Amino acid sequence: MSKLANDTRVFKINPEIDVQNVRFPNRYGFTLAGHLYLPLNFDDTKKYQTIVISGPFGAVKEQSSGLYAQTLAENGFVTLVFDQSTTGESSGSVRNVASPDIFVEDFSAAVDFVGLQKFVDRDKIGAIGICGLGSHVLTAASVDVRIKAVATSVMYDMSDSMWMGLNNSKTEKQREIEKKTLAEQRWADAENGTPATGLHELPFDENDKPMQSSVLFPETLPDGADSVTTEFFNYYRGRAFHPRSVNSASAWTATSPLSYYNFPLQAHIDKISPRPVLIVTGEKAHSRYMAEESYNRLNDPKELVIVPGATHTDLYDQMNLIPFDKFTSFFKKNLE
């Protein structure tokens, strides 16, 4: 462990919270980069309730997840936030490869790491996934029984989103076109010896032609951008820009959707029971239907919280809307 140097967090930092740089392996050999947050009046002779956190999909620990980690540390938890494998400061010779299997494993690797700390109670470890990592954390919890309580915030089912399109809008014709496009991209990557970057949720024009880009969001918001694009742009390119964030400054490898087509997330989330699940989403979040679908697949004990007036990215960083009191009470109770 080491103290933070060249601190690049993009949210308001609480100088009273001790934060340490950490590195830890997952079982596939990637080295994950994390920030370990210690609560106020930390005493390393005590055993703490602990929460591992990651997300959103394509974000880094210096963005939304770090804000969650800091706030929950203020409320008495040890928290660990980490960059997903191949992203941010985590390892991977090929950068920004999205993998459902590896990203699910990353949560369990985070549990490994905190469980080795003498000040962590192994029977009191929970997990939070934000946005696209919400679907991954539920998948992780369905098989990793060391996660005693799990929560999501504005969760996104990345498998459904890539295969079905937002609001299940993708047609069968478009899926066939997309598979052919990805097959051609694989030939190009093989010939070039390096993977191209591209859009992980491939949009189509009015003629069903795929539209591609080497960055998720340009430096300026395109004219006529829809509300969802505008919302993400304002967060990633605006108030929370970070150069290591895939969403802020780059894109995923163009063939990333292939893994998600073959790996439906959340297949067994009903098996999380009898461990408790908290699903939090925004009343106006475009992802709300995904959170509600996941909630309906879960068995009790479960709870759905819909934040009045909140959009998707409001629950990334708007302190007046993120229900931290609810997250705190949920984990305090269920990690007893």
Image (tube, helix red, strand yellow):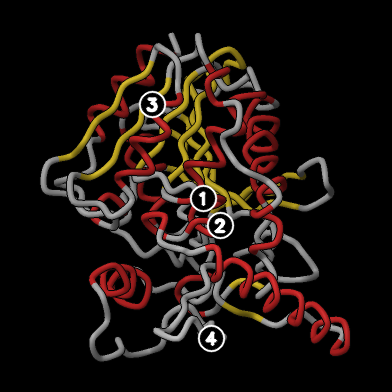
Front position in the image: 174 or 144 = 174
- For disc 2, the marked residue is 163
Residue at image point 12% right, 41% down: 308
Front position in the image: 301 or 260 = 260
- For disc 4, the marked residue is 213
Q: What's under tag 4, amino acid-wise?
A: Ser
Could you tell me residue 143's position as x and y percent?
66, 24
Q: Dot 2 surroundings within 10 Å: few (below 14), some, or many (20 or more)?
A: many
- Pick whichever of labels 4 and 2 is earlier in the sequence: 2
> What is the distance, in whole Å, between disc 1 and disc 4 at their CAs?
21 Å
Front position in the image: 27 or 214 = 214
> What is the distance, in whole Å, between disc 2 and disc 1 at their CAs?
5 Å
- Pick whichever of labels 4 and 3 is earlier in the sequence: 4
**Does the residue at mark 4 contact the one at mark 3 (Cβ under 8 Å)?**
no
- For disc 3, the marked residue is 296
Residue at image point 46% right, 36% down: 128
**Residue at disc 2, secondary structure:** helix
Q: What's under tag 3, amino acid-wise?
A: Asn
Report the side of 5 relative to 143 (left or right): left
Front position in the image: 37 or 333 = 333
Q: What's under tag 1, amino acid-wise?
A: Asp
Q: Dot 4 surroundings within 10 Å: few (below 14), some, or many (20 or more)?
A: some
Could you tell me residue 36's position as x and y percent?
53, 42
**Does the residue at mark 2 contact the one at mark 1 (Cβ under 8 Å)?**
yes
**Does the residue at mark 2 contact the one at mark 3 (Cβ under 8 Å)?**
no
Q: What's under tag 2, amino acid-wise?
A: Trp
- Pick whichever of labels 1 and 3 is earlier in the sequence: 1
Q: Which mark is residue 160?
A: 1
Q: To which quarter of the image does residue 24 belong?
A: top right
Could you tell me residue 289's position as x and y percent?
32, 44
